[in-house]
Every structure is written in structure tokens, then in C-alpha cells.
Image (cartoon, rainbow, N blue to C red):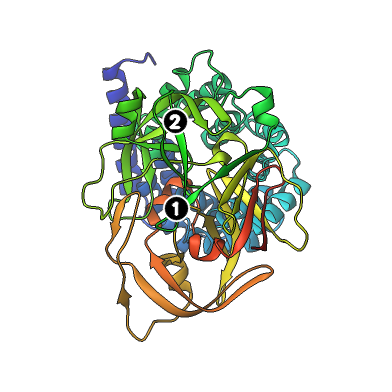
């Protein structure tokens, strides 16, 4: 059929009419009809409608049709970011079809979306043992390797995933992210374009919109090498004094050769971020809009992306730095938004010596005697795994720009506990005020070898950043925790290392 607006409209009308006939001729709860309807809706990008159909089939079906309904239900649920509800279905799916490699891989995806990364890896391994070419499992393993900074191995697995007969749109998106991490922007553009080309024209999810903008942004670099550094700079060790201001690590730096300004070391942000005022003064032009999300009532926030030609902090000089511009600015905050950076975004590791007020940035660091080592994953942000009372596998953002230890409302809901009374607290972040934040006392928080018994934490709404990332963010650890240690965020070894300060 030719790609003509009228032809497309006729196709939609024919599909709608066919659906109506099917619904009239067969019982609405017939699992066979509902699965077929769910498949049709999913192909058309109507994921909410697909969920309704798959749920009906899952409830009424049995045997092979229930398995097929369960697979569709998990796929559509993950696509619409209903990840907190999907693992119960995927676990039952594995029970019904224990030797089905796709069911195992889908359970891996549901575990990943719930923030249980290690359990997800185990499921992906089971899936590939049954079928070494299971694309969904290969994609999951590639994503996991990228999170541990094993980018070349991740690229290999991701390439195998997109070469499979299924050629799922999601797998091309993963490949694009890996290519972007590797600085291969041309290859990332090709992967992201393939991802968009495989979506239904009806698909208007946040990720589709973000990907369109990301393609334009990456293309704007042309032949420029992102995060370019002279060899001696990239391999060097850069020791930078800092001052502590409102519990934030602040250094001095310059943008595009301008006068020095304050820059906050902010590992809770995935990109270097400038205020609108700083961007205008330093000649950083907006290129495209983008989506951001963080703490605050706004949730998902529209911002701008630009490019810093040269960023200098002491002897560290980085060129062609992708940059978020905080425009439009928030106006109802107690203090103005700050300019910030994260060396992790540039592929470098960082050590913060709070006692000596020194930040050290380098490719890698030697061990410090007696330090505690926590596995760290990098998925746009740096995460370590912890636990909160009986809630296990809670992922915490390691945020040098944050102040306290906090947990998400989704983790709080798993505790089956209520404080005697909810003490409201004023908390603001990149998306404004979290007007419903409150203090939860008496929790036992732990990070492998580090125990924080009877701790008071802040309960925050982290739903918006969780949806944007595609998995459940369990909490944030900031200055109150980190400042007690000599903190090393070792990107090369995927470790958060803590030594006595």
C-alpha cells in the first residue's frame, strides 16, 4: 500500500471495523479473541488498550493461550512503565512455562524494571542457556554490561540482539544508548532512527519524543568528538580544592573561556547542567528540547540541550560537552538553581575527600587500605544496591549534589509501616518542590558492609525519574551519608569505595 494519508486512514478504518466484527461475533472474555485483539492494539501503538485485552485473556485463559496472554501483558506493561506491577505476572508466567526462553527473558525484564538487577541477570542467563540467540535476554545482558561499564562487550551482545529475527524496537534503543556512551554518535543516530522507524506512527510516548530530540542533538555534533580531552588530560590526575556550601561540593571553573563561576559536583545529574543565565553569558546555544525528571511536583520537566565548546576546571579541560540548560528556570525555589557537572558523564572517575576539601578526578584510582567496596552500576546515573528494613534490592542514586538519605514512596509502600504521624518536610529538586515529602524515622538501612540502623529518612516521590529511566529508583544517598567517608566513585571498576575520612 502506498504511504498516502488517505490510504493510511482507510487502513485504520478497516482495522477498526474488523475489530468491531470480531467483538460482536465472539464473547468479550474469550481469551483467544482477547489475545489477538491485544496483539493488534500493541502493533498499532495502543498499549493501554492492549493491556486491557491481555489482562482479560490472562484472567480467563489457560494453557498456551494464557502463556501467550502473559507474554503480551508483560511486554505492554513494561512499555507503558507499569513496571511495579509486572513481576507478579512474569513470575507466574515462568511457573507456567519454565522451559520457555522468552518467558524467562520477560521475567528478567520485569525484575530489571523493579530494580532487581542481579536477579534479572540470573534470569537472562537461564534464558540464553535454553536459547543462546534469545534476543530479549541478549538485550538485557547488554544493558547490564553497559551498566558495569563493560561497553565493548555490551556492544557485541546488543548487536547480536538487533540482528535476531524479532528485531524489537527496544533493542535498537539499547544499542543507541551504548553507542552514545562510547562516543559513537553517528552509530547512535542510526540505532535511534531504527528504533523510531519500528514504532507505530501512533506511538507518542515520552521516550519516542525524547529519542527524536536526541537524534537531532547528536547530529548537531557533526565531526566534533564529544568529551574531547588531550591525552595528558585524559590520563592525568586532577586535584581540585573545593568549598562546602549548603552541603554541596563547589569548585571553580570556566565555560567557553569566560570568567570563573561556581560549579557544583553533582553525580545525581546525568549531564553537565547550566542555568539559563550562565548559558546565555557563556554563549552556549540551545539546540533541542529534552525531557528531564527529578524530585519535585513538576515531575517530568522540559529543558534544553546545548553544547559547551570548552569547559575548564583547574587543569582539566574538556571540549564538546553535551549540556543541559535549565530553561525555563524555576522561580519558586528558596535559592537559585546552580550550575553543575559530573565527571562520570565524561567517562572519568571521581574521589571526594570531605576532610581535606579536595576533589580528585582521574581515569582510575588506586585502592585505599581498609576501604569498603560496593558494586556500582551506571545507567544514566550511578546506583548502589541497599536494603530498607525488609525491602531488599533497593537502588539508591549516589548523589553528591543531594543532602540527605531518602527513599521513594514505592519502597515506603513495601515496608508495611506507618510513622506515628507524618512530619512534612520542605524538599526541592530539579523539578521543584516535593510538596508531599515527609520524614520516616526508625528505619534500618544497609549497603552491604555498611549498616545505618534506626535512621530517619525522607520519603520522596520518585515516580517521574523512575518512568524516564525505565526502572524503579528506590532512593538517594547524599551528603549526610557520603560526607563521613573518603568517597571514590570508580567508573572503570564499577565500584563505590568508602574509606574512613
Which picture quadrant has residue 117?
Answer: bottom right
For the point 44% across and 25% down, the residue is 308
In this view of the protein, which residue sits in the foreground, 237 or 138? Answer: 237
- Relative placement, left or right, of 273 versus 87 is left
Q: Secondary structure beneath disc 1?
A: helix
For the point 46% across and 63% down, the residue is 59
Of the image marks 1 and 2, the number of the one nearer the N terminus: 2
Q: Residues within 10 Å of mark 1 (few under 14, many from 20)?
A: many
Q: Is residue 139 visible?
A: no
Q: Residues within 10 Å of mark 2 (few under 14, many from 20)?
A: some
Residue 94, position in %: x, y?
Answer: 64, 59
In this view of the protein, which residue sits in the foreground, 495 or 110? Answer: 495
Task: Say which of marks 1 and 2 sits in front.
Answer: 2
Quick check: 500 above or below 329?
A: below
Quick check: 325 above or below 478?
A: above
- The residue that disc 1 covers is 466
- The residue that disc 2 covers is 254
For the point 28% across and 55% down, the residue is 297
Q: Name the image quarter holding the N terminus.
A: top left
Quick check: 491 above or below 376?
A: above
Q: CA distance from mark 1 to mark 2?
A: 32 Å
Which picture quadrant has residue 206?
Answer: top left
- Relative placement, left or right, of 235 versus 483 is right
Residue 288, position in %: x, y?
Answer: 35, 26
In this view of the protein, which residue sits in the foreground, 302 or 153? Answer: 302
Residue 276, position in %: x, y?
Answer: 30, 34
Q: Secondary structure beneath disc 2?
A: strand
Amino acid at each position: 500500500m502506498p504511504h498516502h494519508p488517505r490510504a493510511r486512514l482507510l487502513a485504520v478504518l478497516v482495522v477498526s471495523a474488523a475489530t468491531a466484527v470480531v467483538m460482536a461475533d465472539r464473547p468479550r472474555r474469550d481469551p483467544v479473541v482477547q489475545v489477538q485483539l491485544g496483539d493488534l492494539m500493541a502493533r498499532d501503538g495502543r498499549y493501554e488498550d492492549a493491556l486491557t485485552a491481555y489482562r482479560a485473556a490472562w484472567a480467563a485463559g489457560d494453557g498456551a493461550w494464557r502463556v501467550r496472554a502473559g507474554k503480551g501483558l508483560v511486554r505492554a506493561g513494561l512499555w507503558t512503565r507499569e513496571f511495579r506491577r509486572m513481576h507478579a505476572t512474569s513470575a507466574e508466567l515462568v511457573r507456567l512455562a519454565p522451559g520457555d526462553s522468552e518467558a524467562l527473558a520477560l521475567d528478567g525484564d520485569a525484575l530489571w524494571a523493579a530494580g532487581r538487577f542481579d536477579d534479572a541477570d540470573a534470569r537472562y542467563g537461564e534464558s540464553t542457556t535454553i536459547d543462546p540467540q534469545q534476543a530479549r535476554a541478549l538485550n538485557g545482558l547488554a544493558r547490564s554490561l553497559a551498566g558495569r561499564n563493560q561497553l565493548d562487550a555490551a556492544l557485541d551482545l546488543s548487536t547480536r540482539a538487533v540482528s535476531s529475527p524479532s528485531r524489537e524496537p527496544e533493542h535498537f534503543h539499547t544499542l543507541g544508548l551504548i553507542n552514545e556512551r562510547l562516543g559513537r554518535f553517528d552509530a547512535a543516530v542510526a540505532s535511534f532512527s531504527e528504533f523510531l522507524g519500528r514504532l507505530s506512527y501512533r506511538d507518542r510516548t515520552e521516550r519516542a519524543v525524547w529519542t527524536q530530540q536526541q537524534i537531532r542533538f547528536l547530529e548537531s555534533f557533526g565531526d566534533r568528538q564529544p568529551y574531547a580531552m588531550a591525552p595528558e588530560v585524559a590520563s592525568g590526575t586532577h586535584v581540585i580544592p573545593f568549598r562546602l556550601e549548603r552541603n554541596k561540593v563547589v569548585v571553580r571553573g570556566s565555560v567557553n573561556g569566560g570568567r570563573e563561576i561556581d560549579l557544583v559536583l553533582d553525580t545525581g545529574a546525568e549531564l553537565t547542567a547550566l542555568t539559563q543565565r550562565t548559558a546565555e553569558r557563556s554563549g552556549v546555544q540551545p539546540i533541542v528540547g529534552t525531557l528531564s525528571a527529578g524530585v519535585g511536583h513538576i515531575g517530568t520537566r522540559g529543558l534544553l540541550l546545548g553544547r559547551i565548546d570548552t569547559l575548564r576546571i583547574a587543569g582539566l579541560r574538556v571540549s564538546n560537552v553535551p549540556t543541559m540548560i535549565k530553561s525555563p528556570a524555576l522561580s519558586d525555589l528558596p535559592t537559585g538553581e546552580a550550575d553543575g557537572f559530573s565527571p562520570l558523564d565524561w567517562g572519568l572517575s571521581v574521589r571526594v575527600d570531605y576532610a581535606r576539601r579536595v576533589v580528585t578526578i582521574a581515569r582510575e584510582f588506586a585502592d585505599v587500605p581498609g576501604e569498603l567496596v560496593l558494586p556500582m552500576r551506571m545507567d544514566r546515573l550511578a546506583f548502589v544496591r541497599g536494603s530498607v528494613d525488609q525491602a531488599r534490592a533497593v537502588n539508591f542514586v549516589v548523589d553528591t549534589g543531594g543532602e540527605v538519605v531518602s527513599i521513594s514512596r514505592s519502597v515506603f509502600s513495601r515496608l508495611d509501616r506507618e510513622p506515628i504521624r507524618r512530619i512534612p518536610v520542605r524538599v526541592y529538586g530539579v523539578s521543584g518542590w516535593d510538596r508531599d515529602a515527609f520524614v520516616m524515622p526508625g528505619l534500618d538501612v544497609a549497603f552491604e558492609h555498611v549498616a545505618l540502623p534506626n535512621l530517619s529518612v525522607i520519603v520522596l516521590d520518585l515516580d517521574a525519574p523512575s518512568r524516564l529511566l525505565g526502572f524503579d529508583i528506590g532512593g538517594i544517598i547524599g551528603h549526610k551519608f557520603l560526607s563521613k567517608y573518603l568517597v571514590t566513585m570508580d567508573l572503570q571498576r564499577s565500584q563505590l569505595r568508602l574509606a574512613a575520612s
